[in-house]
Image: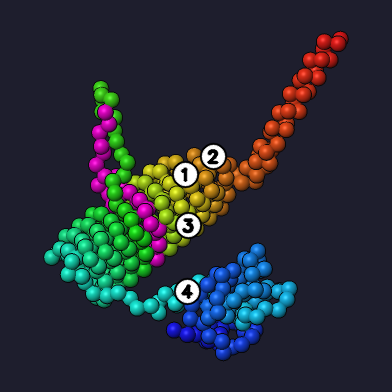
Amino acid sequence: MNFTARQIADFLQGTIEGDETITVNDVSKIEEGKPGTLAFLANPKYEKYIYDTEASIVLISKDLKLEKEVKATLIRVKDAYEAFAGLLDLYEQSKPKKSGVSPLSSIASTAETGKDLYIGEFVVIGENARIGDNVQLHPQAFIGDDVSIGNNTIIYPGVKVLKECQIGDNCVIHAGTVIGSDGFGFAMEEGTESRRKVPQVGNVIIGNDVEIGSNVSIDRATMGSTRIGNGVKMDNLIQIAHNVEIGDHTVIVAQSGIAGSTKVGKKVIIAAQAGIVGHVSIGDGAIIGARAGVPNNLKEKEMVLGSPAIDVRLFKRAAAVFKKLPDMYRQLYQMERELKELKKSE
C-alpha cells in the first residue's frame, strides 16, 4: 500500500519540507535508504546519513537543525522515534491477520474459546482452559489445564503456558518462552546428603499489555503467585524465579535474572545481564545498570552499577581510579625502591 507524505504528516500531525505528493510503500534504515521507503532520524550521530540517503521520506524531530539541504522529503514531528514506532504499529496492523482453527490442533472438550481466534497447527489447549476473543495461538503452543488467556493476546510458536497460569489482555509472548515451570525449591533431607524437591503448587499471574521476549522462563510460585504487573516489558533470555513480583511498567533487558521472592517496584529499569538476589525489595523507579549484581534492597529511584552493586556516582569514581591502578602500582613500586636506597645510604 502506498502512502503520500501528506497522508503520513496528517496522521502524525507533522509538517512537511519538500514534495508532499511523494509516496512510500516500505520502511528502511536511514543509512540503507532506498527510493520508495520511509526512514527516520532520532539519534544525532546518524545525522551524516540524511544528506545522502536514498529514502524518499525521512521523519525528523522538529527542533533538529540541519547543516545543509537534503534531497529527501522531510516530515518534522515532536519525537521522530515515537512517531516512527507509531507508523510501524499502523503498518503492522494493516497486514492481514491469520484466523481460524487448524484441524491439526487439539482442544479439550471442557475448554472455553472466544471469538475470532487463530489456533495454528499442533496447538494443544488443556482441560478447563479459557481463551478470550481475538487471541492468536501460533503453531506448537501449549496451553495447560485451567489456564486463562485474555482478549487480543498473541502467543507465538513453541510457547508453553503451564497449568493454572493466568495471562491478561493485549499481551505478546514470543517463541520458546515457558510460563509456569516449577520454581527451584529443594530441602535438605535430615541425615542424608540428598535434597528433596519441594512441590511448587502456586501459579503465575501476568497482567495486561505485557510483552515477553523469546526463551524467557517465569517460574510458578511455591505457594501463591509469581506476579508480572501491567505494562511490563521483558527482553529475551530472562529468568524470573518463584514468587517474584514485578511492578507495573517495569522494563527488564536480556539475560537478566531475578531470584525467588524478590519484589520489584513500578517503572524499574533492569539492564542487560543484571542479577538480583532473592528476598529483597527494589523501590519504584530504580535503575539497575548492565551486569550489576544486586545483593540488598534498593530505595525508590536509586541508581546502581557494579557487582556488588553500588551507587552509580560512586561506581564511576571507582572505575576512574581502577583504570589508573597499573600506573599507581608502578609508582608505588618505584617509591619503595627509592626508599630502600635511601635507607641503605644512611
What residue type is disc 4 on? Leu
Q: Secondary structure at mark 1?
A: strand
Above-or-below relation of 211 to 71:
above
CA distance separating discs 4 and 3: 21 Å
CA distance separating discs 3 and 1: 14 Å
Q: In front here: 49 or 290?
A: 49
Residue that badge 3 annotates? 251
Q: How packed is label 2: few (under 14 Cα within 10 Å), some, or many (20 or more)?
A: some
- 210 displayed left or right of 331: left
Residue situated furthest bottom in the rendering: 21
- Dots 2, 1 in contact, CB < 8 A: yes
Does the magenta segment cover residue 291?
no
> Which of pointers 2 and 1 lies earlier in the amino acid sequence?
1
What residue type is disc 2 on? Ser
Q: Residue at x 50, y 58 (%)?
A: 267
Q: Residue at x 55, y 76 (%)?
A: 34
- Dots 3, 2 in contact, CB < 8 A: no
How would you classify the magenta stretch by its main secondary structure?
Answer: loop
Above-or-below relation of 224 to 81:
above
Q: Which mark is residue 307?
A: 2
> Which of pointers 2 and 4 lies earlier in the amino acid sequence?
4
Q: How packed is label 1: few (under 14 Cα within 10 Å), some, or many (20 or more)?
A: many
Position of the N terminus by quadrant: bottom left
Residue that badge 1 annotates? 275
* Quarter of the rendering containing residue 248: bottom left
Q: Nearer the viewer, mark 4 or mark 3?
A: 4
The part of the chain drawn in magenta is 194-223
Q: Residue at x 25, y 61 (%)?
A: 140
